[in-house]
Image (tube, rainbow, N blue to C red):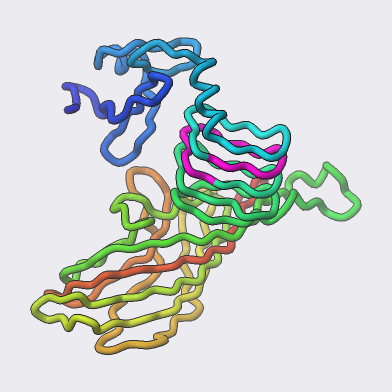
Amino acid sequence: MEYLKGQIVKPYEVLPDGEVAFTDGTTNNIKVNQPTCEAYGYKYSNTTGGCYAFNRVPQLTQKIENERTIQRGVNNDTGRDTQNNVIIGNNNTLKGLNNNTFILGNRHTVDSGFNNSSIIGGTKGTITRESEVMMGGGRELLQAGSGESAANLYTRRQMSILELSGVTVDNTATNLTIQGDGTSFINVTNNSIIGFDIYINRLELGGTSGTAGNYSYRNIRGAVHIDNSYTMTVTIGFSRNIAKIGVNGTCTMVDSTTGGVPSISVNVTDRNNVQNLWSATVIMHEVVSTKTTF
């Protein structure tokens, strides 16, 4: 469907319960207001705040979703419009529009709209990226002897692994995307520190100046400081070329904020007229201050 005149979003999917998901061309699963919903000929629900192509049947929808979700534990919230999820543990939450996720442990959260992700252990981890594999870092820590009055010391800690990839055919600096989807970067949270360990493989596949089979393999380590206003400082502490045939190419971690969504990515570049496939594994140690700003 094309954009209607005066609209910056358009429908892209009708969900199983009849709700219409909208997109602006970059971000999917956008909620719209009543005028936008009705402009496209759909019905707006004041009760749920959703836009619907047909009447909802909550009991039937919930039954279908429950049949497609495996749970072993108590007090787990599977959210709405979720399918094909496995939860083993207690007090875990899917915030909705989550498909093909796996959760092991307690008090984990998968934010709305993220799919194909796994939490493989620990407690109190949060999935905030597509296709993220994560281990939670544990419960809130309190200053010794101060009890709940030390809430200003609260943090969230976790370790995550993400796969990024992309292609270059000239010397244009290019940000790699999650799973090579062309649009998704590594979302970040303000008041946080991310330590990263990147392993990146560059494979030449052709081009008039390229040699099929030439490659380079590099390891980059560093950290990103994200303050309260999302100003990012990237520090590279270690960069080592592990192996190569031919040249090394260039790669580093950068601020890739796009469309108002704060993010980081691996930025790569090589020569003109060389067809390169880039594949990066990014291991991240993340600490988020949930009370104190900086």
Of residues 116 and 157, the one nearer the viewer is: 116
Q: In the rendered image of this protein, does residue 135 appear above or below residue 220?
A: above
Q: Residue at x 32, y 57 (%)?
A: 180
Q: Residue at x 38, y 32 (%)?
A: 29
Q: Residue at x 75, y 49 (%)?
A: 140
Q: Residue at x 60, y 38 (%)?
A: 70
Prevalent SS, magenta region: loop
Kindly give the residue lying farthest to the front in the view shown.
67
Kindly give the residue lying farthest to the left in the view shown.
208
Toward which corner of the image does residue 147 lie, by quadrant? top right
Give the number of callouts: 0
Of residues 277 and 156, the one nearer the viewer is: 277
Q: Inspect the magenta stretch and tell me whether residue 93 lies in it.
A: yes
Q: Inspect the magenta stretch and tell me whether residue 187 lies in it.
A: no
Quarter holding the N terminus is top left
Q: In the rendered image of this protein, does residue 271 appear above or below residue 279?
A: below
Is residue 287 visible in the rendered image? The answer is no
Which range is magenta?
Answer: 85-101
Residue 150 image point, x, y percent: 80, 47
Residue 193 image point, x, y percent: 57, 60
Is residue 193 visible in the rendered image? The answer is yes
Residue 103 image point, x, y percent: 61, 46
Of residues 115 and 112, the one nearer the viewer is: 115
Of residues 288 and 50, the one nearer the viewer is: 50
Horizontal side of 241 relative to 74 (left or right) equals left
Residue 102 image point, x, y percent: 56, 47
